[in-house]
Image (cartoon, grey):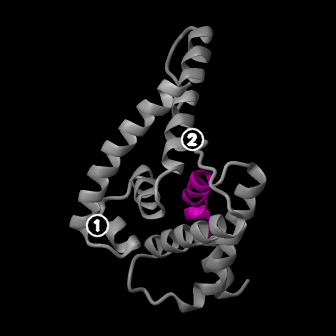
Amino acid sequence: MNTKEIQFKQLFEENKDRVFRICCSYVQSSQNRDDLFQEIFTNVWKNLGSFRNESHVNTWIYRISINTAINYCRLQNNNDKRCQEIKQDILSDEDAKLARKTILEKEIKIMFDTINRLPVLEKSIISLVLEGLDHAKIAEITGISEGNVRVKFHRIKKKLKQMMEEQKNEL
C-alpha cells in the first residue's frame, strides 16, 4: 500500500460514521444513501493530494461531504431527509421500550422531514449542529462568520419548532 492509500484508509475509518450520518440527513433510500456515501469518499480520494492543511482534515471532509450531498440532491432532485441514529432506551419493560422507540422514531422522522424543507444553508447548519460541531467549525465549513452561524442557528431552531408543530398537527 502506498502512502495515499494508507492515509485514505485512516481517514475513511475515522470519518465513515460521520459521513454516513450526513448521507442520512440528505437522502432517504438506502440505495441513494449508499451512492452518496460512495460519491463522498470518491471525492475525498480524488482530492486527497490537494489537501493543503489550511484547516483540520475532518473539517475538510465535512466540506466535501456537505458539498457533495448538496450537489447529489440537486442532480437527483432528491429532497429526502432522514437520520438513522436513534439512541437505545433505558427501560426494563420490553413493551415500554418498543412503544418508546416507536414514538421516538416518529418524532425523529418528523424532525428530519421538517429539516428537509429548510433551505440548503439552513439544512447544512442544522446537520452540522446535530453532528456536534461548534459554531466556529460550522463557520469554517460553511464559509460564513461565526456570529452569523449563531444568529442563523437561533432562527433555525425557532423555525423548526414552529414547522414541526404544524407538521404534527397535520398528522
**Quadrant into which the N terminus falls:** bottom right
- Residue 39 position within the rendered picture, expressed as x and y whole percent measured from the top left: 70, 71
Choose between 146 and 131: the one closer to the eye.
Answer: 146
Q: Which mark is residue 16?
A: none
The stretch of residues the image draws in magenta is: 12-26
From the top left corner, tell me how far across and down residue 122 is, in percent.
41, 58
Comparing 117 with 64, the one in front is 117
Q: Quadrant of residue 134?
A: bottom left
Look at 51% across and 14% down and name the residue there: 91
Neighbours of disc 1 within 10 Å: few (<14), some (14-19), many (20+): some
Cα gap from disc 2 to disc 1, whole angstroms: 24 Å
- Which residue is under mark 2? 85
Q: Earlier in the sequence, mark 2 or mark 1?
A: 2
Q: State the residue lying farthest toward the right.
A: 31
Q: Is residue 15 left or right of residue 166?
A: right
**Residue 127 lies in the magenta-colored region:** no
Which corner quadrant holds the C terminus? top right
Quarter where residue 97 is shown: top right
Q: Position of residue 47 (x, y in %)?
A: 60, 86
Callout 1, which amino acid? Answer: Ala
Secondary structure that dominates the magenta span: helix
Closer to us: 160 or 29: 160
Horizontal relation, residue 89 to residue 161: left or right: right
Residue at figure coordinates x 75%, y 63% from the top left: 35
Residue 5 pos. (x, y %): 68, 81
Name the amino acid, label 2: Glu
For this view, does 105 lie left or right of residue 168?
A: right
Tell me the residue that label 1 is attached to.
Answer: 136
Residue at 57% across, 36% down: 109
What element does badge 2 sit on?
loop
Q: Is residue 107 above or below residue 115?
A: above
